[in-house]
Amino acid sequence: MTEQTLILIKPDGVQRGLIGEILHRIEAKGYEIKAMKMLDASEELLAQHYHEHVDKPFYPSVVEYMTSAPLVAAIVEGDRVVEGVRSLAGATDPTKAAPGTIRGDLGRSWPGDSIFNLIHSSDGVESAQYEISVWF
Ligand code: CDP
Ligand code: MG
C-alpha cells in the first residue's frame, strides 16, 4: 500500500515566499502532492495536531507562531514517504539542521521564543494518518 504523510508549510515559509521551493524539493525527490490547501490554523486544530505538546512550556509560543499567518497543508504520497520527508525536512533546530535539508538550507534562528523551522512533517505512519484526518 502506498504511504501518505502530512506536511505543513508553516507561516514563516509562506511569509518568506518559500512555498514553491519547499514543494519543489518534495516533488523533485519523486513524491506526489495528493491534496493541498492554504488556511489560517485555529487554536483548536493546532491543539489536535500538536496534542503531544499541548502541556509543554513551549506550546504557547508554538500557537503564536502557527497562527501568525496562513499556512499550507498538504498530503504527500509515495513509498516510505514518512521517513523520506522527515529526512528532507531535517532536524527541528534550523541552526543545527544539516545543509541539504529544507530547514538546514532555508532556515535559521531568529530572535524570540519560537523555533521558526518552515515545515512540519509527520513522524510516523500512524501519526500521519491521524494528522491527515485533522487537516483534511
Ligand atoms: O517538528 P518536529 O517534529 O521536528 O519537532 P517536535 O519536537 O515535534 O516539535 C514540534 C514543533 O514545536 C517544532 O517544529 C517547533 O516549531 C516547536 N518547538 C518549539 O518551539 N520549542 C521546542 N523546544 C520544541 C519544539
Ligand atoms: Mg514532531
Image (cartoon, grey):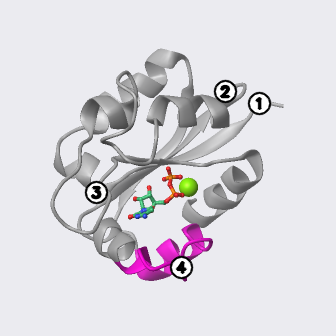
Query: What residue sits 53% from the left and 79% below the top?
Result: 54
Q: How many other residues sit within 10 Å of disc 3, few (<14), some (14-19) or many (≥20)?
A: many
Mark 2 CB near ligand 1 (8 Å cut): no
Q: Is residue 69 left or right of residue 61?
A: left
- Observer-side mark, 3 or 4, equals 4
Q: Is residue 91 left or right of residue 21?
A: right
CA separation in Å, label 2 and label 1: 6 Å
Which span of residues is magenta-colored?
A: 42-60
Q: Is residue 73 left or right of residue 111?
A: right
Circle 4 SS class: loop
Residue named by callout 4: 54
| In magenta segment, residue 130 | no
**Split into 4 quadrants, where in the image is the N terminus?**
top right
Circle 3 SS class: helix
Mark 3 CB near ligand 1 (8 Å cut): no
The disc at residue 2 is 1
Q: Circles 3 and 1: CB distance less than 8 Å?
A: no
Mark positioned earlier in the residue sequence (2 or 3):
3
- On the image, the x and y values in percent for residue 105 come to 29, 29
Residue named by callout 3: 11
Task: Reply above or below: 8 against 32.
Answer: below
Mark positioned earlier in the residue sequence (1 or 4):
1
Mark positioned earlier in the residue sequence (2 or 1):
1
Residue named by callout 2: 78
- Observer-side mark, 1 or 4, equals 4
CA separation in Å, label 3 and label 1: 29 Å
Mark positioned earlier in the residue sequence (3 or 4):
3
Q: How many other residues sit within 10 Å of disc 1, few (<14), some (14-19) or many (≥20)?
A: few
- On the image, the x and y values in percent for residue 19 come to 29, 39
Mark positioned earlier in the residue sequence (4 or 2):
4
Q: What amino acid is at disc 1?
A: Thr
